[in-house]
Amino acid sequence: MADIFILGIESSCDETAAAVVRSGEQVVANVVASQFAVHRPYGGVVPELASREHLKAIVPVVRQALVEAQQSYESIDALAVTQGPGLAGSLLVGISYAKALAFALEKPLIAVNHLEGHIHAVLLEERQNGDDRVRFPALALVVSGGHTHLYLAEPSDGTWSYHNIGHTRDDAAGEAFDKVAKLLGLPYPGGPIISWLAKRGNPRAVNFPPAQIKHPQRRPSAAKSDHPGKLGNHLPRFDFSYSGIKTAVLRYIETQQMAESIAERRQRLAELPKPRPEDYLASCDQKTLDLIASFERAMVEDLVGKTLAAAGENDVECLLVTGGVAANNLLRETFDERAAAAGFPVFFPSRPLSTDNAAMIAAAAYPKFLNQRFAAMEFSAEAGMILE
């Protein structure tokens, strides 16, 4: 079969991305324009600003991806774009541009779920490396700034089937990292700087008990599956909750009278044009470093513990851990250790493909291309899109 080149476009949140992937298994170009500098003063993503930045970046990012791939608009075989979930305005920028290109070029257009893209980031690199170690069904933990989900995933009739067996009831894990960083006067995004600083603290200094989800699952129908295969017809839930730990950090700050030192940290860092990690470290006392390390440990133990519990209750062959939080070093190390002890192989994407990117969108689109599952031109953004 001739090589198939798919141009992927991703604009679900605060990265404008374009990539060209060959036959679903080789990344030939992957370009990402980040908006971190734009949103950092606000401590999180501002939707209106994100949309405006996508409008500025979408054309040059796509052009750069085609140049790096040594392809042209005419030579690509199809386009793929993120339909959701995400910020509605951001999604619409990528979708509108992809529709215009597909119409002008008379090329098929494929709509992709952002969460499915994260799962295929792992599968893409395994195929690219020539490895055949991933076995199905797999349990995929998609963990990022906006999502914390558990899916049972496996190939089905040339495409893929996904069954959600767990999700966050409130904050996503990455959102909790960002909010705690903001509480402590640290920059957005919070995950990278918390991970770096946590190595200097005592992870057992502060006891954050795991979240206790006492009320029943609010969508009982989600626990049932029509899939007749190995995944079964009744799937127990393994939900997450991270609003409580954020509140626990706030209460610790109050009881330990840390507000004054946090205000001083914000003032000191605001005077630096481009603070380095060493500057953030110099602004943190040991109590702050211990709090950061304890918070990271509690988050990682909850994510790993619930994922392994879900794996133990389901007939899965391996674990896939993906999304922006999957770049966290402690999370990877803990999964490697505990999954191996439990007998589950675990796979991660490389760090560039952990965060939002368009290569994962093009990779997820390839099976749809082979099955001619093309999008009608009237489709639109779905900010709350689910994966099924």
Image (tube, helix red, strand yellow):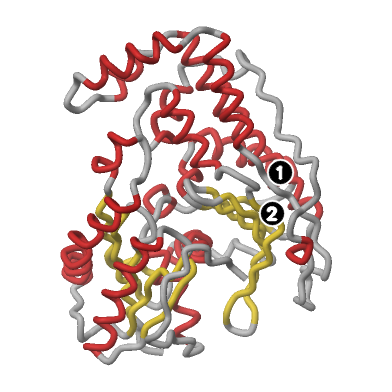
Q: Nearer the viewer, mark 1 or mark 2?
A: 2
Q: Looking at the image, which residue is at 43% across and 84% down?
A: 375
Look at mark 1 in the image and give the residue it sits on.
Answer: 306
Q: Position of residue 334 (x, y in %)?
A: 61, 36
Element under disc 2: strand
Inter-mark Cα distance, 1 to 2: 9 Å
Q: Is residue 181 above or below residue 165?
A: above
Q: Which residue is at the front of the view, 158 or 209?
A: 209
Q: Which residue is at the front of the view, 269 or 200?
A: 269
Q: Which residue is at the front of the view, 201 or 171?
A: 171
Q: Position of residue 135 (x, y in %)?
A: 65, 64
Give the side of residue 313 with respect to residue 40, left or right. Answer: right
Q: Position of residue 57 (x, y in %)?
A: 20, 60
Q: Are marks 1 and 2 in contact (CB under 8 Å)?
A: yes
- Sequence-first tag of 1 and 2: 2
What number is the disc on residue 19?
A: none
Look at mark 2 in the image and give the residue it sits on.
Answer: 166
Amino acid residing under circle 1: Lys
Residue 229: image quadrant is bottom right
Extreme residue toward the front, this view: 48
